[in-house]
Image (cartoon, rainbow, N blue to C red):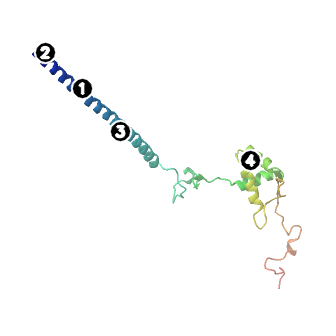
Amino acid sequence: MNDLAEIIKQAEADVQEQEALAASADARAAAAQADAAAAREKLAEARIVLEWLRRRSHPQPVAAFPLKQADPSASQPLMRFGRPVPEETLTDLCQRALEGLGGTATNKQIRDRLNRDGHDVDLDKVRGTLKYLSRKKPAPPVTTERGSGLWRLQRPVTPDAGVPSAAKATLNGATGGEP
C-alpha cells in the first residue's frame, strides 16, 4: 500500500503542477490578448495619423498669383480666397439682366433671368447685389422703393443732351470762344 500511497501523492503533485502550468498559460494568454488589443488600438491611431499626413501632403489650391506663365490660356483660372474668380461679376450680370427685362423688374424676375442664362444664383445674392448697386456713389446704377422689391435701372443721363457743341462750356469754365 505504501507504493500505492506514493503513486497517489506523485499523481497529486503532477496534477498541481499541471494546474499551475495551465494557470500560467491562461495568464500569459490574457496578457497576450491585452497586448494584442493595445497593439490594434495603436495601429488604428497610426493609420489615422498616416491618412492625415497623406491629406496634408496634397494641399488644396492656394489663392496665389503666378509670377509668369508661358501660355496664359492654358493656365488654371485665377483664384482668390480659395475660389475661382468669375469671368463676369454678379453686379454686371444683374445689370445686364435688368436691362434685358426692360429696365424694371423684381428680385425673382432678375434671378429667373440669370438662371435662364445659365448662372445659378441665389435670390439673396441677387437682392444683396442690387442693394449694393443702389448704394453706389455718386450715381447709383439701380434704384428701388424701400421694401417694394422692384428695381429700376437708371440710364445715364447726359446733361448736355440737345445742346449744340458750340454752345457748351468747357470744363475749366472758359467760354470756348477765341480771344
Q: CA distance from mark 1 to mark 4?
A: 85 Å
Disc with the residue nearer the chain's start (2 vs 1): 2
Which residue matches tag 1? 19
Judge whether 77 appears above or below 159 on screen: above
Residue receiving disc 2: 4
Q: First in sequence: mark 2 or mark 4?
A: 2
Few, some or many C-alpha atoms within 10 Å of disc 4 (few <14, some 14-19, many ≥20)? many
Circles 3 and 1 in contact, beta carbons < 8 Å: no
Count of marks, rendered view: 4
Query: CA–CA distance between discs 2 and 1?
Result: 22 Å
Estimate how packed mark 3 is, as few (under 14), some (14 to 19) or many (20 or more) residues with alpha carbons within 10 Å: few
Closer to the observer: label 3 or label 2?
A: 2
- Decide: is 6 above or below 65: above
Q: Amino acid at mark 2?
A: Leu
Looking at the rendered image, the quarter that the C terminus falls into is bottom right
Q: x, y (%) of residue 153?
A: 81, 57
